[in-house]
Image: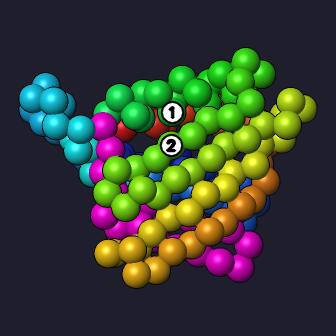
Amino acid sequence: MSTPGTARLEYGDDSFEIRCFSHSEEDEKSGNPYNCSFYMSVNSGEFSGKSPCCECDYTDIKELITQLEDLIDFKADEAVFRELSYDSIIRFVGDGCGHITVSGTIYGDAKIQSLCFEFMTDQTVYPSFIDELKRL
């Protein structure tokens, strides 16, 4: 299990993690779409990267949860999460047989560095990841 403020998807040596998650209910209520801040990190094969300055609207996290639940229940083919600060994007694409490809691009501070990645998972690792997202 991940530490509080963390949601980790891990399959073999590959992983995607949201950590140090912080949500401002005050900013959300005032309509500020930058009401969540967090770090993202990816390990994909021999490559890894961290995106230290991520922000999103809390509704984006809730939408990701819904999309992932639909994906593992075979009600959807894809779930997409895009953060607002640097436009990092994570895609989860199912093949209809329980295999899910995780891919995307994350950016480092000031978009000086980037990591394009892709790795395979299967639906068995998603229930705990979704539970951790719900606790953020």
Q: What element does badge 2 sit on?
A: strand
The one of 33 and 120 positioned closer to us in this rendering: 33
Q: Amino acid at mark 1?
A: Leu
Q: Quadrant of the C terminus?
A: top left
> Which residue lies under the disc numbered 2?
81
- Is 9 left, or right, of 125 in this rendering? left
- Picture residue at 24% right of the left edge, 38% below the top: 33
The one of 130 and 96 positioned closer to us in this rendering: 96
Query: Magenta span has 44?
Result: yes
Is residue 8 depicted above or below 40 in this figure? above
Query: How far across and down, in percent of the image, does residue 125 sit?
Result: 70, 41
Residue 30, numbered circle: none
- Are there few (<14), some (14-19), or many (20+) residues within 10 Å of tag 2? some
> Which residue lies under the disc numbered 1?
64
Is residue 104 depicted above or below 36 in this figure? below
Q: Are marks 1 and 2 in contact (CB under 8 Å)?
A: yes
Q: Mark 1 and mark 2: span between their CA atoms? A: 6 Å
- Picture residue at 35% right of the left edge, 67% below the top: 52
The one of 2 and 58 positioned closer to us in this rendering: 58
Q: How many marks?
A: 2
Identity of the residue furthest to the right in this view: 97
Q: How is the image coloured?
A: rainbow
Q: Amino acid at mark 2?
A: Phe
Q: Which residues are magenta?
A: 39-57
- Are there few (<14), some (14-19), or many (20+) residues within 10 Å of tag 1? some
Residue 135 in view in this figure? no
Question: Principal SS element in the magenta part?
Answer: strand
Residue 93 in view in this figure? yes
Q: Earlier in the sequence, mark 1 or mark 2?
A: 1
- Picture residue at 51% right of the left edge, 29% below the top: 65
Q: Please tell me in which quadrant of the rendered image residue 13 appears.
A: bottom right
Is residue 108 depicted above or below 9 in this figure? below
